Image (cartoon, grey):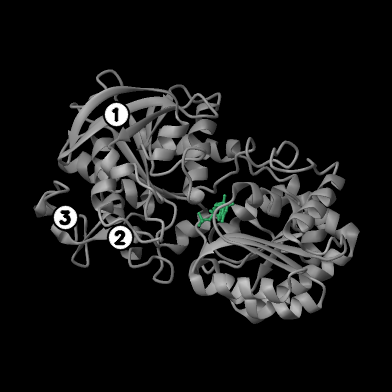
Amino acid sequence: MRVLFATSEAYPLIKTGGLADVSGALPKAISQLPDFKGDIKLLLPAYSAVLAKLKAFKTIANIIVLGQDCSLITGKMPDSDIEVIAIKNAALYERTGGPYSDENGIDWLDNPLRFGVLSRVASLLCSANSPLKTWLPDLIHCNDWQTGLAPAYMKLLDNSKTKSILSIHNIAFQGCFNANWLTQLELPAAHFDMNGFEYHGQISFLKAGLFYADKLSTVSPTYAKEIQTAEFGFGLEGLLQTRSADLMGILNGIDADEWNPATDKHLPKNYSNSRITGKHAVKHALQQQLGLDTNANAPLLGVVSRLTHQKGLDLLPSLMPKLVDLGCQFAILGSGEKKLEASFNALAERYPAQVSMNTGYHEHLSHNIMAGSDFFIMPSRFEPCGLNQLYGLAYGTPPIVSNTGGLADSVCDTTTLTLKNNSATGFVVKNVTSASLLVTIQQALGFWQDKKIWRKIQKNGMLQDISWVSSAKPYLSFYQQTLK
Ligand code: ADP
């Protein structure tokens, strides 16, 4: 089975969020399954960061795609044998800033072209005109809107025999652009239609993928159901209902090479469920590093997140003075909405020994917050899968989450019953409101006071199998089903 895994980011080459974690870990995990006979190659743009990290790369083809001169280069992932095909075009991809936006967070104006080229190359690699003469994929696995046009090109331009899957990692991001792009994107105008890639008068990359891919998947079973409703479907629920039989929800796993407290290189001390004392040392070091009181008895609540409406963290600032009065500390790492960043910064100024706020993107600090905190807060309004709550489970940092998407599928609320049957792993907020979040945090603090119960909750989470190996198996079955 030859699989082309097309994505716009993959850890450790380039990362803005969960998609990178999945793209870095899933191909590796599938390729290591004993039942997998074949190979997976990753396709992504050669951003500057990718060129800096790709191992031993060489140019294998020069092509013109959507009028752009591109080179295809191949190399290996820095941490595995997975082969990467990267699309090199300096003007499109080698820029200061992020993969989607400039340093000020403004989306690149030519994103339709940048990800149109990614999608077009993906399609070409699955066609009779592929520049890789000897490697034709049986299956292409596309991810999110950035690769959404690939299944459309495959069906409409290339008459490709390769089967296609599109995975939705977050349906809120749809890649909708002005219809003026039609010509440059070489999209046939006849299909700029409700039964095609048109969406409310615009070109929608995601809708194209949802419409033309052979099969669809998303990153948790609950989210697969939610996106077929008006509340969570962001306008695409109707189309998804018609494709319900082709849509599969598979919960993400975590990459144990990166996220394992027993081996995590970012931590000053490693620990595991059977040697939990190391976690106390990490908490102490984190408090010290962040300028918080080094008080082992102060419950430390961690946040690592994009600060957007989705994540529900706007519910937190108004609760923090009260929680600080109760003795709580906060370690916050996140960036996004400036107003929310300012609220957290103001609280950090007001309570320097209890509240720490860091903006920007810090891999090292994120691991230390995950390990050093006692609780992890994630009250998302919607959450396709969410990775941080999974890291929280693995790191003995029980998550406080809302009851949606992958959070609902991975965290079991602590009650008398779930404590008794050893399934309690965290705390579930009933409604996404400040009042409800406060009640749940207070309940969690109550359980934390009882060290015996707390160890039980930690242990239940730490011993749960949430590795990519168990998620890779259903993906492989889904690949096989798609090829039938
Ligand atoms: P999403 O993909 O919606 O942002 P996920 O929970 O699925 O949310 O994944 C987020 C990933 O990005 C996690 O690996 C998390 O640790 C990481 N992350 C988010 N914000 C930051 C940050 N400011 N610094 C470091 N890592 C971050």
Distance from the alpha carbon under mark 3 to that under mark 2 = 23 Å
Q: Which residue is mark 1?
A: 72
Instruction: Find residue 117 and report its horizontal and vertical position in percent.
Output: 25, 42
Q: Amino acid at mark 3?
A: Trp
Mark 2 or mark 3, which is nearer the start of the sequence?
3
The quarter of the image holding the N terminus is top left
Residue 327 occupies which quadrant of the picture? bottom right
- In the image, 264 versus 101, the foreground residue is 101
Q: Is residue 126 in view? A: no
- Mark 2 CB near ligand 1 (8 Å cut): no
* Position above or below: 11 against 56: below
Residue 147 picture quarter: top left
Query: Quarter containing ligand 1?
Result: bottom right
Q: Which residue, given by chain and number where applicable, does mark 2 sit on?
A: 239
Q: Is residue 153 left or right of residue 386?
A: left
Give the Cα separation between the discs numbered 2 and 1. Answer: 34 Å
Type of amino acid at the residue the image marks with label 2: Leu
Q: Which residue is mark 3?
A: 181
Residue furthest top as drawn: 134
From the image, which quarter does the C terminus lie in? top left
Q: Residue at image x 54%, y 36%?
A: 473
Q: How many marks?
A: 3
**Amino acid found under the numbered disc labelled 1:** Leu
Q: Is residue 429 left or right of residue 86?
A: right
Counting residues from the start of the chain, the first of labels 1 and 3 encountered is 1
Q: Position of residue 135 (x, y in %)?
A: 31, 21
Q: Residue at x 66, y 81 (%)?
A: 435
Whole-percent x and y of residue 91?
26, 42
Up the image or down, 181 lies above or below 71; here it is below
* Image coords of residue 439 (percent x, y): 72, 77
Q: Secondary structure at mark 3?
A: helix
